[in-house]
Image: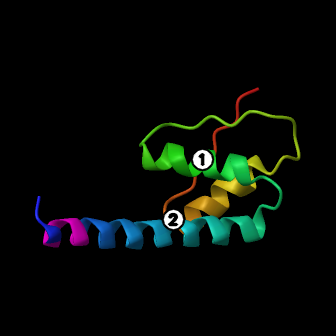
Amino acid sequence: MDCANIRQLYAQGERETLFLHDILAEVNTVIVGQETMVERVLIALLADWHIILEGVPGLAKTLLIKTMAQAIQAEFSRIQFT
């Protein structure tokens, strides 16, 4: 691999890193105090995984997914299991 290719890869990595930081910053303005959960949801989305969020009511699970969908301009749908 020559220096030009390495520079291109580095520049692409920089752009994508900034993009991810922008998404995290936007979501964290709405979801406060749940940075780990926000990061894990973003990792799952990047890895093309499915996500099941479990927890007691009031943890902002639905708000997180709705906000994340808006940040990446994706569709949002919710399935509730009881």
Q: Which residue type carries mark 1? A: Val
Question: How far apart are the two marked residues, 1 and 2, measured between alpha carbons?
Answer: 12 Å
Q: Earlier in the sequence, mark 1 or mark 2?
A: 2
Q: Above or below — where is 65 with respect to 56?
A: below
Q: Position of residue 78 (x, y in %)?
A: 63, 45
| Residue visible at 62% across and 51% down in the picture | 39
Instruction: Looking at this view, name the residue that lies furthest to the front.
Output: 3
Query: For the C terminus, which image quadrant?
Result: top right
Q: Which residues are magenta?
A: 4-8
Q: Above or below — where is 17 with respect to 40?
A: below
Q: Is 10 within the magenta?
A: no
Q: Quadrant of residue 5?
A: bottom left
Colour scheme employed for the rendering of this structure: rainbow
Name the secondary structure under disc 2: helix
| Residue visible at 36% across and 65% down in the picture | 13
Q: Which residue type carries mark 2? A: Leu
